[in-house]
Amino acid sequence: DIQMTQSPSTLSASVGDRVTITCRASQTISSWLAWYQHKPGKAPKLLIYKASTLESGVPSRFSGSGSGTQFTLTISGLQPDDFATYYCQQYESYFHSFGQGTKLEI
Amino acid sequence: QVQLVESGGGVVQPGGSLRLSCAASGFIFSVFGMHWVRQCPAKGLEWVAFIRYDGTNKYYADSVQGRFIISRDNTRNTLYLQLNNLRLDDTAVYYCAKEGPASVRATQDWGQGTLVTVSS
């Protein structure tokens, strides 16, 4: 099975900051990586797929990069609504494993 | 628009069983693969199971293999998850989710979740 390692587990930032979250796969997954935003009591929300493609309706301050085993999610100009938990997920195989999550705190 | 509505959660004793349902609407259910994903209390998201659009292939996380069964009824636009031999650590919010089209493939749409509590 493909293991996903995400870091950091917690990130403290302020409105307007630029932050980066990293995700590493235990084996190559090409660009089959998605990023999700999850808030308590809500459904997860797809932000980015194929490592760097922005989902329709997602603000352009979100961006993704990487391929193979190393990936990053960058949020430029944090907004109050961005404080949430973020997950990477590989879908190279049918066993769609997630990273452990990064909680973005004010 | 896409709607996924889970139901069937509740409180069950260890060793018990439960069947979750996910009613789908707003898209052609029979052409999309479907997932179950869960979030245990104070933990992250955990992928649980996937079923292909026609039900021919099913895949499970190691943690539920042999205990959970994913199925679908394309005539009723409904996804199911049969939970057997439940353990305390199966307590979680269970989400059903729809894979995206071939151009996306990632899990694109999610329900609001249903809570399963395993407790004696």
Image (spheres, coloured by chain):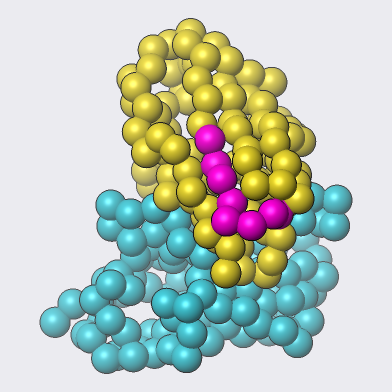
Q: Position of residue A105 (x, y in %)?
A: 34, 26
Say if A14 sits above or below A103 in the image: above
Say if B71 sits above or below B4 in the image: below
Say if B55 sits above or below B35 in the image: below
Q: Residue at x 63, y 25 (%)?
A: A62
Point out the image quarter for the C terminus of chain A: top left
In magenta segment, residue A23: yes
Q: Residue at x 46, y 23 (%)?
A: A81
In the rendered picture, chain A carries what hue? yellow
Residue B10, quarter of picture: bottom left
In magenta segment, residue B116: no
Q: Residue at x 39, y 12 (%)?
A: A14
Point out the image quarter for the N terminus of chain A: bottom right
Residue A16 left/right relative to B97: left
In the rendered picture, chain B carries what hue? cyan
Q: Which residues are magenta?
A: A22-29
Which residue is most to the right? B103
Q: How many discs appear?
A: 0
Can see residue A16? yes
Which residue is most to the top? A16
Question: Which residue is more in the foreground, A57 or A86?
Answer: A86
Question: Which residue is more in the foreground, A90 or A62?
Answer: A90
Which residue is most to the left? B120
Q: Position of residue B89 (x, y in %)?
A: 28, 72
Q: Position of residue B102 (x, y in %)?
A: 85, 57
